[in-house]
Image (cartoon, helix red, strand yellow):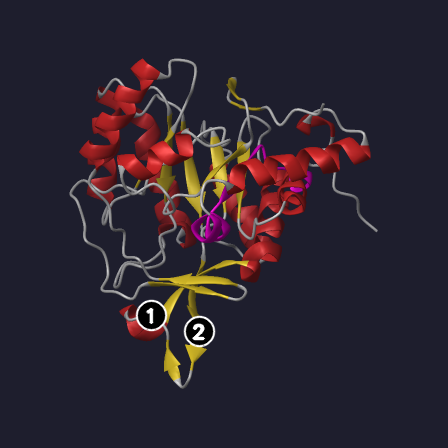
Amino acid sequence: MPTTQTTIQHVSFENCLMNAAGVYCYSKEELEQVINSSAGSFVTKTATLEARLGNPEPRYINTSLGSINSMGLPNLSLHYYLEYLIELQEIYKERTYFLSLTGLNQEDIHKSLKQVQESEFNGFVELNLSCPNVPGKPQIAYDFETTDNILKQVFSYYKKPLGIKLPPYFDIVHFDQAAEIFNRYPLAFVNCINSIGNGLIIEDESVVIKPKEGFGGLGGDYIKPTALANVHAFYKRLNKSIAIIGTGGVKTGRDVFEHILCGASMVQVGTALQKEGPEIFERLTRELKAIMEEKGYKTLEEFRGKLNYL
């Protein structure tokens, strides 16, 4: 039978699938549902130094083609997730998890990472440089000079495995410029992509979410082509030591297959997980293995990044 085992920075995962930050990860109870599913790992809610309530509701709406949200980083604080992950390390010694974090300013980012550096946590950090839904706060990763400065400072003191979550890029020159920066640093991975920011969904002459006059991040079917493009663009440009995590528009095994074909080492599920629940990981794994068996692939490495061109 085919295997969906994968590796990031010499750390092995039995399955390439996991949740996307923001879905089934707010509390220990939600994370435990992912632990008990077929997922290979999980990532926490994106944590800030202090707990946050987030934006006013309604702030997340499912649509026929995906979802729109303007959550505003609701979370239970960095301390909450860090303490829980350290507990899990003692229980599941053979498993590795991801801690997502960000800051509302650069000082908070460094305070958070220094706290993690000094802790007993030995998993991966996913530094979110792409949150599009905090009013008045821009997406850091669209400012290349700031991104470079942050990473330069981070890697002067942070020595544990760290990757970054990225917003979608839409111009070839931006792929080139971003990759040139990322290749300067010992990143474990980049995650492509966060939601496409500032979409607008209208029903019955009204917006459907309350924050930002209805503007919010798009997920699901809307973003799959953009996600695949970002995954493959960075797969072709980044040092091979930097893995790609693919996120966006994953609701079938075929979607997972295409992310890996474009170069992803792991694949995160967001909107479809929100709609279907953690049982989705078993179905997606089964569907992916069926495709692999049909095509004669026994491992993900046999087709990772091997997209054909006309």
User: Is 113 rendered above or below residue 23?
Assistant: above
Toward the left, the furthest residue is 50
Can residue 305 be seen from the camera position used here? yes
The residue closer to the viewer here, 166 or 271, is 271
Do the residues bearing badges 1 and 2 touch, measured as CB atoms within 8 Å?
A: yes
Can residue 152 be seen from the camera position used here? no
Label 1, residues with CA under 10 Å away: few <14, some 14-19, many ≥20: many
User: Is 6 rendered above or below residue 276?
Assistant: above
- Residue 183 placed where, x, y %? 51, 34
Residue at 27%, 51% in the rendered image: 73
Residue at 29%, 36% in the rendered image: 29
| Element class at badge 1 | loop
Query: Magenta includes 274?
Result: yes
Please name the amino acid that badge 2 sits on.
Answer: Ile
User: Is 6 rendered above or below residue 213?
Assistant: above
The residue closer to the viewer here, 90 or 153, is 90
> For residue 170, which numbered disc appears in the image?
none
Q: In the visual, does 69 lie left or right of 250?
A: left
Distance from Cα at disc 1 to Cα at disc 2: 8 Å
> For residue 209, which numbered disc appears in the image?
1
N-term mark: 1 or 2:
2
The residue closer to the viewer here, 62 or 100, is 62
| Rendered image quadrant of residue 115 | top left
Residue at 37%, 77% in the rendered image: 207
The magenta stretch spans which residues? 261-276
Q: Which residue has dot 2 on it? A: 201
Q: In the visual, does 134 lie left or right of 239?
A: left
